[in-house]
Image (cartoon, rainbow, N blue to C red):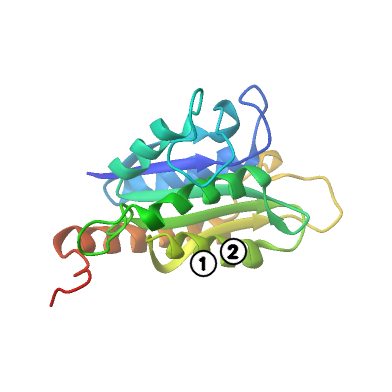
């Protein structure tokens, strides 16, 4: 069973409905179709200190989240679009993952080597492709592998107020993209589980 960890980077507290959460739950549904199971953590529920270390001291909730990332096979990052960008919460998550760059083994492999990353993006403005590009570059930089079609998204009509969570039915195109993302990510994760990256100085 593949282990999926979803990080919901909405700005909304858990007491408030979140379109990002709904899309992530749809992603987990798609992963269940291909032998995956997991959970979603809402990042604003945790005191994640600013910084680029794996542990920023007293009260920092990141070390426990980091441990769950390391235990997972697939990291699923969900974010809304704000001002055409990933949320500030999402950017803090990426900044904390920067610590992986200096946490390598003897072969130069980061803790994220062999793990697959995906992205789920929602918003009411254009920018989903730009947000995917930012996430994929950052996640790959810190050692995650990106499968083909590793992202899904939904964006509403510009300057309108309908959110993903307000839709009466799940859009077919978004659901098809979500299922493709899950199939490809699961496939790559299984391949990597059977053949790790060689690392420096290895054949």
* x then y, percent, for residue 163: 73, 44
* x then y, percent, for residue 136: 50, 64
Q: Vertically, is 61 above or below 161? A: above
Residue at figure coordinates x 54%, y 53% from the top left: 120
Q: How far apart are marks 2 and 1 (CA)?
A: 5 Å
Residue 180 occupies quadrant: bottom left
Task: Name the residue at the right extreme.
Answer: 159
Q: What element carries label 2?
A: helix
**Nearest the eye: 49 or 67:** 49
Q: Vertically, is 173 above or below 148? A: above
Label pair 2/1, CB-CB below 8 angstroms: yes
* x then y, percent, for residue 119: 51, 55
Number of numbered discs on residues? 2
Could you tell whether 173 is left or right of 116 in the image?
A: right
Residue at figure coordinates x 57%, y 34% from the top left: 49
- Is the C terminus in the top left, top right, bottom left or bottom right quadrant? bottom left
Can you identify the residue that label 2 sits on?
134
Could you tell whether 39 is left or right of 135 in the image?
A: left
Mark linked to residue 58: none
- Is the N terminus in the top left, top right, bottom left or bottom right quadrant? top left
* x then y, percent, for residue 55: 44, 36
Can you identify the residue that label 1 sits on?
137
Could you tell whether 1 is left or right of 88 in the image?
A: left
Q: How crowded is mark 1: few (under 14 residues within 10 Å), some or many (20 or more)?
A: few
Residue at figure coordinates x 43%, y 64% from the top left: 140
Q: Residues within 10 Å of mark 2 (few under 14, many from 20)?
A: some
Residue 135 occupies quadrant: bottom right
**Nearest the eye: 93 or 53:** 53
Residue at figure coordinates x 63%, y 42% from the top left: 89
Q: What element carries label 1?
A: helix
Task: Name the residue at the bottom extreme.
Answer: 203
């Amino acid at each position: 069973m593949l282990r999926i960890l979803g990080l919901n980077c909405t700005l909304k507290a858990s007491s408030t409905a979140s379109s990002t959460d709904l899309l992530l739950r749809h992603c987990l549904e798609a992963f269940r179709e291909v032998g995956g199971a997991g959970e979603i953590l809402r990042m604003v529920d945790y005191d994640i200190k600013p910084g680029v270390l794996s542990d920023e001291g007293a009260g920092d909730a990141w070390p426990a989240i980091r441990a769950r990332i390391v235990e997972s096979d697939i990291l699923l990052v969900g974010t809304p679009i704000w001002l055409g960008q990933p949320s500030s919460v999402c950017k803090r998550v990426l900044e904390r993952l920067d610590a992986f760059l200096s946490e390598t083994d003897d072969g130069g492999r980061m803790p994220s080597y062999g793990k697959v990353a995906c992205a789920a993006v929602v918003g009411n403005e254009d920018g989903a492709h730009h947000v995917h590009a930012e996430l994929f570059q950052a996640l790959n930089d810190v050692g995650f592998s990106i499968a083909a079609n590793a992202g899904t998204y939904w964006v509403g009509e510009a300057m309108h107020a309908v959110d993903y969570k307000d839709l009466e039915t799940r859009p077919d195109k978004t659901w098809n993209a979500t299922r493709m993302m899950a199939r490809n990510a699961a496939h790559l994760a299984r391949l990597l589980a059977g053949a790790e990256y060689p690392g420096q100085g290895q054949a």
